[in-house]
Amino acid sequence: MFENIKSVVKAAGDIMLKAHNIQNGIESKEGRANFVTKYDVEVQNYLFQELHKLYPSATFIGEEEEQKGNVPGEYCFIIDPIDGTTNFIFDYKHSAISVGMLHDGQIVAGVVYNPYLNELFYAEKGKGSYLNDRPLHMKNLQLRDGIVGFGTCPYYREKADETFFIARKLYDRALDLRRSGSAALDICYVAANRFVLYYELLLSPWDYAAASLILTEAGGSISTLDKNELTFTAGCSVIAATPSAHEEYFQL
Ligand code: IPD
Ligand code: CA
Ligand code: CA
């Protein structure tokens, strides 16, 4: 069944690759720089329709439509149809589809797909994580050994001072900083040893649900910035890192 979920997500990636005239028909949502394109809606509708065929009793939480069915059911999909919409609008080619599956409130499967690079990150609970067909095993690097990624909470501008204060501290410890524009890919990049740490002060469950499992199944540590567990029914802050860099952060 998991193979089928991966196939559905890859097929949805074609909708992003074939997108044209993206700048036409953009709508603003709540908060500055918060947009939705017709493709966000199209990808989400496609995922809802195809995943419903595979799991008729599952419920859905999607960014572009709060929920379908009585959430949370035994099985519940948490979907970000396009994570990195601002990148998508400006043809930056760094965006992903994120599909997480909860079973009784616990994340048990996750798929994050970047169609531009044809990179499919996925994990099932207890079965490890993969990038395409390659198993992901994290090296336990320290901050000084790698790049730190972060998100700027563009829809919550009041978080900017704290975000950049932390960035300044981490910049002094790490090799360099990056701001990619897709939280789901940022977390997967930690799992793939491309980043040693990623943080953002406020995200929604669809940004991190799938990627959080990919990260932990690869051997990484993830929590809120208060060192609590992530929540999947409401948003929270996120720090995803190697176990060493995660500890280091809390000693800064
Ligand atoms: C956003 C991206 C961005 C992060 C924002 C998210 P969206 O998701 O993941 O990198 O900084 O906090 O909301 O709106 O493009 O799906
Ligand atoms: Ca998102
Ligand atoms: Ca989105």
Image: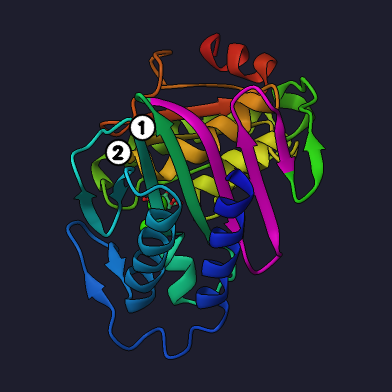
Image quadrant in which you'd find residue 173: top right
3 w.r.t. 15: above or below: above
On screen, 198 above or below 69? above
The quadrant of the picture occupied by the N terminus is: top right
Q: Is residue 3 visible?
A: yes
- Check the image and report above or below for 99 versus 39: above
Q: Is residue 13 left or right of 158 when viewed as pictured?
A: right
Q: Residue at x 60, y 63 (%)?
A: 10
Q: Secondary structure at mark 2?
A: helix
Residue carrying label 2: 159
Residue name at image x 41 percent, y 16 percent: 229
- The answer to whether the residues at label 2 and label 1 have Cβ atoms under 8 Å apart is yes
Secondary structure that dominates the magenta span: strand
Three-letter code, disc 2: Lys
Q: Bounds of the magenta span?
A: 106-130
Horizontal arrangement in the rendering, residue 171 relative to residue 147 (left or right):
left
Q: Residue at x 34, y 52 (%)?
A: 154
In the image, residue 114 lies in the stretch drawn in magenta: yes
Residue type at the position of mark 1: Glu
The residue singled out by tag 1 in the image is 162
Spot occupied by residue 221 in the image (x, y as percentages of width and height): 59, 20
Element on which disc 1 rests: helix
Measured as percent of width and height from the top left, residue 151 is found at 46, 44
Calculate the distance from the C-alpha at mark 2 to the C-alpha at mark 1.
Answer: 6 Å
State how many labels appear.
Answer: 2
